[in-house]
Amino acid sequence: MPSYPPTFTDQVVAQPVRAQFEAFLDEHRSALNGCLDGLTEEQARRSLVASRTTLLGLVKHATFVEKVWFDEAVTCRSRAEIGIPATSGESFIVDDDDTIATVQHAHREACEASRRATSSLGLDDILHGHRRGPLPLRWVHLHVLRELAQHCGHADILREQLINE
């Protein structure tokens, strides 16, 4: 019998939609964070495409995404106040002091902060802090899920290239 992700089990299907959103988000958060497992620092930093995209950069960017959508959008604090880059493109830049351990840890902390920031909100609650204007939490969950799924696909391809060298 094949092993399916937790989001495909009857336990998740029978849950309220909020629990389903959270399960799918957490599954993709974990998959993206785990793309660095077992790699060397050099592999995690290696650029295999024309853009700045590296596996370490993808996870660092995912931390930025968490803070934009679940800190900036929820708290209305500026990116400068939060301590994140002003633009998405800058969030992929890997600094000399970034390591697999530090980037994974920062990502896990950001995900936990996201869960806390939205725990008392309903899916139809409006978030006012994002540059696009007021958005319901439901839309934010869907947007973040879409972005995480896209980056998980990028990570799968990059990791496959690194492992099969």
Image: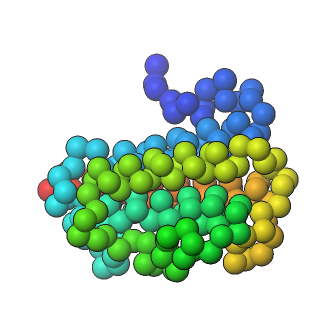
On screen, 89 above or below 121? Answer: below
Residue lying at the far front in this picture: please name it: 81
Query: Looking at the image, which residue is at 55% across and 30% down?
Result: 6
Residue 111 x, y percent position in the rendering: 53, 49
Q: 62 and 152: which one is in front?
A: 62
Q: Is residue 163 left or right of residue 7?
A: left
Residue lying at the far top in this picture: please name it: 1
Name the quarter where the C terminus is drawn: bottom left
- The color scheme shown is rainbow
Query: What is the quadrant of residue 135 in the picture?
Result: bottom right
On screen, 94 above or below 20? Answer: below
Query: Looking at the image, which residue is at 60% across and 32% down?
Result: 8
Q: Is residue 105 visible?
A: yes
Q: 4 and 108: which one is in front?
A: 108
Q: How many numbered tags mark residues here?
A: 0
Query: What is the quadrant of residue 24 in the picture?
Result: top right
Q: Is residue 154 visible?
A: no
Q: Is residue 40 left or right of residue 74?
A: left
Q: Is residue 93 left or right of residue 132?
A: left
Query: Looking at the image, which residue is at 44% across and 53% down?
Result: 107
Q: 109 and 4: which one is in front?
A: 109
Residue 64 x, y percent position in the rendering: 50, 65
Query: Looking at the image, which residue is at 74% across and 29% down?
Result: 15
Residue 160 x, y percent position in the rendering: 27, 53
Residue 126 x, y percent position in the rendering: 83, 61
